[in-house]
Image: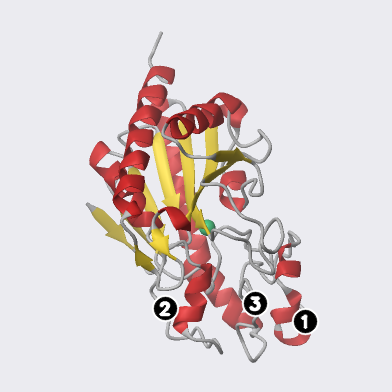
């Protein structure tokens, strides 16, 4: 079952059936007509977490909801606060709405990206305040609302919620990549914002499960987790959020953007992770 909105698709049951919530904010490929970029669609897919929604889709057969972005990350990045505006991209350099810079504008990767990973400018113009505001209201806000609502409903039903924010990363960092140019990434990087977005026992469960399957797993290096694991988490209130990045080299060709033979194995290993997480969350929410 799926519910769709211009901003996202919700795969799986309409109401929570398990304590686990998944979201894939960077796998969208519906290019809005008003993008107005100066580079090709293929170049814009550089910022995409290709096929990440599909990698996690078997979770929906286990009753888990999977929220997935419809539009590309380079159009508007759901893993940013709505106030994370890059003033260099705004006509007139002023933003009259909520302004909450994260520092990502320095890398050209604030709410609306200014440059690709290699530093190429995405636009040959500045964007109007109205144009940016429309992207926030039409796409960013509904996605965040849907995720918050799902986590709320899950917590209301089970007394706790576990959220995995699903991503993928390029095998090697680009000129403006996290951790610096040329940095070779691990197979999997977990981010719990240095232990503040979920119980460390949950991070350890995921790390150990994937490590036992032969993956090299790093925690908070170089990705600590960004807005989507920050915004709705509160471990003391039993709301856990963990970011999970898989390396693109495990399942796709970064040049052709085609899946490789590794896709099926990674997909099945992630399904086994979902089974392990469901066993853990079922136990943790069992009435004593
Ligand atoms: Zn991502």
Q: Quadrant of residue 3?
A: bottom left
Confirm whether residue 13 shows in the render.
no
- Residue 115, label in figure: 3
Give the answer, above or below, for where 31 lies relative to 191. below
Dot 3 alpha-carbon crowd within 10 angstroms: few under 14, some 14 to 19, many 20 or more? many
Closer to the chain start, of discs 3 and 2, is 2
Instruction: Look at mark 2 in the image and give the residue it sits on.
Output: 31
Q: Residue at x 71, y 68 (%)?
A: 107
Q: CA separation, marks 1 and 3? A: 17 Å
Closer to the chain start, of discs 1 and 2, is 2
**Badge nearest the viewer, 3 or 2:** 3
Give the answer, above or below, for where 18 lies relative to 56. above
**On the rendered structure, is 86 left or right of 166?**
right
Closer to the chain start, of discs 1 and 3, is 1
- Residue 93, label in figure: 1
Q: Residue at x 53, y 40 (%)?
A: 216
């Amino acid at each position: 079952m799926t519910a769709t909105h211009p901003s996202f698709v919700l795969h799986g049951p309409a109401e929570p059936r398990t304590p686990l919530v998944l979201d894939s904010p960077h796998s969208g490929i519906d290019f809005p007509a008003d993008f107005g970029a100066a580079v090709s669609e293929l170049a814009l897919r550089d910022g995409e977490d290709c096929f990440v929604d599909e990698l996690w889709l078997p979770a929906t057969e286990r009753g888990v909801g999977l929220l997935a972005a419809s539009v590309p990350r380079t159009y508007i990045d759901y893993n940013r606060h709505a106030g994370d505006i890059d003033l260099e991209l705004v006509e007139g350099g002023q933003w009259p709405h909520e302004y909450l810079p994260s520092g990502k504008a320095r890398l050209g990767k604030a709410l609306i990206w200014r440059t690709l990973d290699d530093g190429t400018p995405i636009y040959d113009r500045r964007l109007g305040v109205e144009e940016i505001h429309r992207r926030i209201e039409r796409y960013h806000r509904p996605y965040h609302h849907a995720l918050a609502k799902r986590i709320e409903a899950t917590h209301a039903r089970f007394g706790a919620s576990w959220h995995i924010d699903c991503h993928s990363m390029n095998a090697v960092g680009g000129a403006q990549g996290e951790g610096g140019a040329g940095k070779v990434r691990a197979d999997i990087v977990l981010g719990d914002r240095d232990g503040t977005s979920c119980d460390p026992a949950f991070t350890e469960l995921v790390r150990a499960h994937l490590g036992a399957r032969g993956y090299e797993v790093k925690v908070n290096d170089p990705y600590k987790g960004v807005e989507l694991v920050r915004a709705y988490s509160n471990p003391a209130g039993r709301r856990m959020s963990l970011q999970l990045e898989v390396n693109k080299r495990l399942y796709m060709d970064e040049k052709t953007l085609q899946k490789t033979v590794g896709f099926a194995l990674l997909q099945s290993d992630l399904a086994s992770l979902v089974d392990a997480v469901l066993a853990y969350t079922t136990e943790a929410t069992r009435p004593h």
